[in-house]
Amino acid sequence: MNAHEFRRRGKEMVDYVADYLEGVEGRQVYPDVEPGYLRPLLPTAAPQEPETFEDIIKDVEKIIMPGVTHWHSPYFFAYFPTASSYPAMLADMLCGAIGCIGFSWAASPACTELETVMMDWLGKMLRLPAVFLAGEAGEGGGVIQGSASEATLVALLAARTKVTRCLQAASPGLTQATIMEKLVAYASDQAHSSVERAGLIGGVKLKAIPSDGKFAMRASALQEALERDKAEGLIPFFVVATLGTTSCCSFDNLLEVGPICREEDVWLHVDAAYAGSAFICPEFRHLLNGVEYADSFNFNPHKWLLVNFDCSAMWVKKRTDLTGAFKLDPVYLKHSHQDSGLITDYRHWQLPLGRRFRSLKMWFVFRMYGVKGLQAYIRKVAKL
């Protein structure tokens, strides 16, 4: 496919996508297929000779669409809504065309710097405390993760590294293994399963705090668990508070839980994966009160803020808490500006090395809708 054909086929694909979205309510939401339906419909190996674009598109309707669950259908009520907008789709096209692997500033300066600015823009929409913003010389800042699950795991690993180094500095004879077997993390019994999974991957104990009659984690229950575990010689180090649980959209009480975490010097991570988008509206912002006690905060614009998957927004108060846990600088990743103090290398903020130019989606959406347009969208959905 050369540039001329790409122009033609690209226009056809835009029309196909627009037609699909405009008519998605007419498609059966959940596919009427059995497991293994696809394999018999495809050849057993890739074709030796090129096939036509027309044949591929025909097979999209014949083979792929019958097995698609249509998340954007107005009749889709499972799991959570997934964000979609034409500006974000156009930005994704541009991201694919540019094709940078933005693991460092030098790998693509615009990819890094636009993300830093967009995360500040979004943080200001939420009225996050200034300490979470990068600004021009802030100690905190934001990063786009692939999902809230990644954000929780990254926060847990950063907290684990931080507490381990602090304990070893105070008692040089302590081994990492000795500390690890005593570390305990906590979350409400309503927290997402990804929190438990983060504990499994991080190799630490995770204890569920019983929720109250409104399915919220309260200070008394958390304090009781902390005191009991400390009495047994364990080391509490990490708490996840959820704002908008998956099961019933309940909210843990940050104004109660936060002060305990600060007093006990325990890392508090706030997971607002779904509900967080609503906090850009002043009338819903009170639901975020207490975030000032958090060490990290995360929500998913790809669930309710018109930014297509994947785009999970995570902020930290101290960026060194992340970079201290993940920073490695082999010679092939070094560049001349990395020690200038003026730039961010996002590979030190995440699990993968490579990363896409995801901030383009935020930039397109924020500019083409504006804050008022995004607030109007949230309010429209909230009233349904």
Image: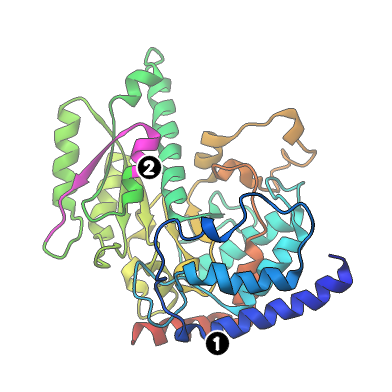
In the rendered image, residue 157, in percent from the top left (x then y), is placed at 44, 37
Would residue 61 appear left or right of 232 to someone viewing this image?
right
Q: Residue 198: within the magenta?
A: yes
Question: On screen, 149 above or below 114?
Answer: above
- Badge 1 marks a residue whose secondary structure is helix
Closest to the observer: 136 or 65?
Answer: 65
Q: Horizontal and vertical percent for residue 300?
A: 46, 63
Is 274 on the left-hand or right-hand side of 245?
A: right
Q: Quadrant of the N terminus?
A: bottom right
Choose top left, top right, bottom left or bottom right for residue 143.
Answer: bottom right
| Magenta-drawn segment | 197-212
Query: For the residue marked with disc 2, what is the amino acid?
Result: Ala
Q: Residue at 64%, 77% (x, y): give it.
A: 87
Between 67 and 297, which is closer to the camera in this rendering?
Answer: 67
Disc 2 designates what residue?
198
Density class for disc 2 (Cα within 10 Å; few <14, some 14-19, many ≥20) is many
Residue 337 falls in image quadrant? top right
